[in-house]
Image (cartoon, rainbow, N blue to C red):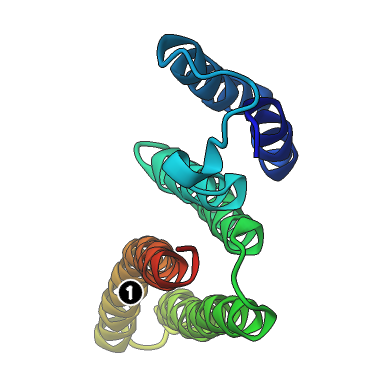
Amino acid sequence: MNKETFIRELNKKLSKLPKEEKESALEYYIEYFNEADIKNDENVDKELGSPSKIASEILANYAIKDNVGKTKASKIRISAIWFIILAILAAPITLPLVIALISIILSMVLVMLSLIFAFGITALAIVGTGFFTIFAGFTVMVQDFATSIMFIGIGLATLGVGILISMAIFYLSKLSFRGIISISNKLLKKFGSSKLK
């Protein structure tokens, strides 16, 4: 494969990257060819590897880089997972392996979303119970002041526990999505490096 074909193929494989990232990657390889004084008729993929392999590495690296240091957690993690899936699809691996890798990644994401939803509903129920108990404490205040204070105290404690659980769920969901991205990247590198040679 000559360098023009290589750049054209790499450009196609990186079509889902943001424009600046794609242009930066293409510029790198164009400069590499110019500095190495590689002629157009030389076979460049033997030295560098296939454009598919390089594209999958660039997409996976972008997914990890895009995930670090940003604050909009769920949108960023989903986009990072999407770029890892694109990196898997860009790699020239056998079709069953691609399906297996995507299935593993999607099942991890679905399990994590299910757990976050279940724990989120539980935390919401605990917070609701706390508010209801506080309200009940105020409604019985005219009948028995001691019982009212007890209900308000229990309600405040329940509300505090619910808020703490909500914060823990949020923190653990961020860690979980980072873990999924890390595992996905490792799977891509492991299976990609063994099949791309």
SS class, disc 1: helix
Residue in the foreground of this view, choosing between 137 and 107:
107
Q: Residue at x 59, y 71 (%)?
A: 93
Q: Residue at x 56, y 49 (%)?
A: 50
Q: Position of residue 63 (x, y in %)?
A: 48, 47
Q: Amino acid at mark 1?
A: Ile
Residue in the foreground of this view, choosing between 13 and 172:
13
In which quadrant will I find the C terminus?
Answer: bottom left
* Residue corresponding to mark 1: 165
- Residue 113 lies in quadrant: bottom right
Image position of 86 (left or right of 44): right
Q: Residue at x 48, y 71 (%)?
A: 195
Q: Residues within 10 Å of mark 1 (few under 14, many from 20)?
A: some
Q: Position of residue 34 (x, y in %)?
A: 50, 11
Residue in the foreground of this view, choosing between 166 and 4:
4
Residue in the foreground of this view, choosing between 170 and 71:
71
Q: Position of residue 101 (x, y in %)?
A: 55, 78
Instruction: Examine the rendering and report whether any part of residue 86 can be seen.
Output: yes
Image position of 63 (left or right of 88): left
Q: Position of residue 180 (x, y in %)?
A: 41, 69
Give above or below for 197 relative to 143: above
In which quadrant will I find the N terminus?
Answer: top right
Residue at the far front: name it: 41
Q: How many marks?
A: 1
Instruction: Examine the rendering and report whether any part of residue 135 can be seen.
Output: no
Image position of 19 (left or right of 75): right
Q: Residue at x 32, y 80 (%)?
A: 158
- Residue 23 lies in quadrant: top right
Give above or below for 38 relative to 58: above
